[in-house]
Image (cartoon, rainbow, N blue to C red):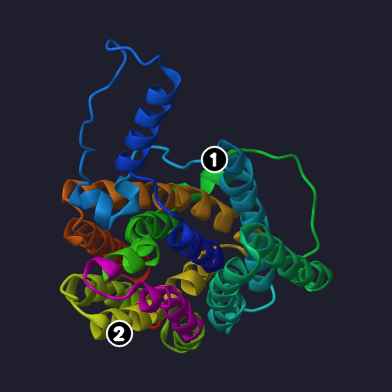
Amino acid sequence: MSSPSASITSTINDKQNKPSYAASSSSKSASIKDDAPDTEANILPDTPDPPQSDVEKADPVAKPAFAGFDPSSFPDGGVCSPIGASMIFYPAMSSTGTWFFKRRALALGIMAAGSSLGGVILPIMVDRIIDQAGFPWAMRGAAFLLLALLVYANLTVRSRLPPSPKPWSLMEFILPFQELPFSLVVFASFLFFFGMFLPFNYIILSAEYHGMSQRLAAYLVPILNAVSIFGRTIPGYIADKSGRFNTMIATSILSALLVLCLWLPARGNIPYILFAALFGFSSGAFVSLAPALVAQISDIRQIGLRTGSMFAVISVAALCGNPIGGALVSREGGAYCGLQVFGGVMMAVGSVVFVGARWSLVGWKVVKV
């Protein structure tokens, strides 16, 4: 859910030198020739290196499986980092929701805007430190900054309701799904999540595929995150005035339309920059409004539990969406049309389910909800 982690990943991937079949083939041949005795049976004929396919040139996802993968990086980057980010973001969100009622969406939006600000600062900071001091010090610098911020957060974040320890029960996380409005909100968010992160992870690659310079493309994600600051706060303010479900439906439909009508046909620098800004605004609304929807249909004592249930389900969509997108790029021979259509359609279907969730509460009445 956190924008900085996705942004730093994009920056690091952009910095890495991707290995190719040619490099591995030539190094292997050289090693065999050096080690083997110089006999007629062991001399290997010179064979041309296999050419790179269009997919390999266009998309690092299509490189050989596990090429350049360091297994030692998996526990920290693949396990510890997401667990830590979840333990920071979601308790802060749930605690914030207990302090507000009439302006809950705005409060959650202001809280969530912090990750967008981090998504602007951290990628640029990491990029500059890598150039000047190398990757290890870039990670240390990011870690020291986060440590200082987390010391402040741990000293100040409080819930209005005091904690009441009780035995853990799996059924407490399952029982909310018996309520139709909650189930529809979770299902809609699940579908929306399938497409929401595709622009974050593929906009740089697709922009370079269509001719944008690597230097300019590197700023697309910071642009997206910068505008997302306003996307997480302004729709929250509007939602408290005109209805949170109403605002969520409008911004979700806008996100789907931007992907299908702007990103899909985009060719050139201006359309990509415009899409990054507009999608940052519309998608940012989801981050602040989804917890507000859950809080609106839940008892205040159940907000944390129900929010956790929702994000536990939709995290599966976030996990699966990017590999599916990469597979679609590979199947298209390096083109991004299939990925873009998939992301736009999933967000559009999610928007329709949000309409169903609203209908389950008030029917088709034109009211604030």
Q: Would residue 333 appear left or right of 94 to someone viewing this image? A: left
Q: Position of residue 273 (x, y in %)?
A: 32, 82
Disc 2 crowd, CA 10 A, few/some/many (<14, 14-19, 20+) = some
**Amino acid marked by disc 2:** Leu
Q: Earlier in the sequence, mark 1 or mark 2?
A: 1
- What is the quadrant of the C terminus in the image? bottom left
Up/down of 313 relative to 7, above or below = above
Q: Secondary structure at mark 2?
A: helix
Q: Quadrant of residue 119?
A: bottom right
In the picture, measured across the screen, residue 66 lies left or right of residue 91, that is left
Q: Position of residue 349 (x, y in %)?
A: 25, 61
Magenta-span inclusion, residue 146:
no
Q: In this rendering, which labeled residue sits more in front, label 1 or label 2?
A: 1
The residue labelled by disc 2 is 274
Tell me if residue 246 can be seen: no
- Among the 4 quarters of the image, the one containing residue 57: bottom left
Numbered badge on residue 44: none
Let me know if residue 216 is in the magenta part: yes
47 in relation to 318, above or below? above
Separation of marks 1 and 2 at Cα, in angstroms: 36 Å
Residue 70's mark? 1
Residue at 39%, 23% (x, y): give it: 32
Question: What is the span of residues highlighted in magenta in the rendered image?
Answer: 208-230
Residue at 40 percent of width and 81 percent of height: 281
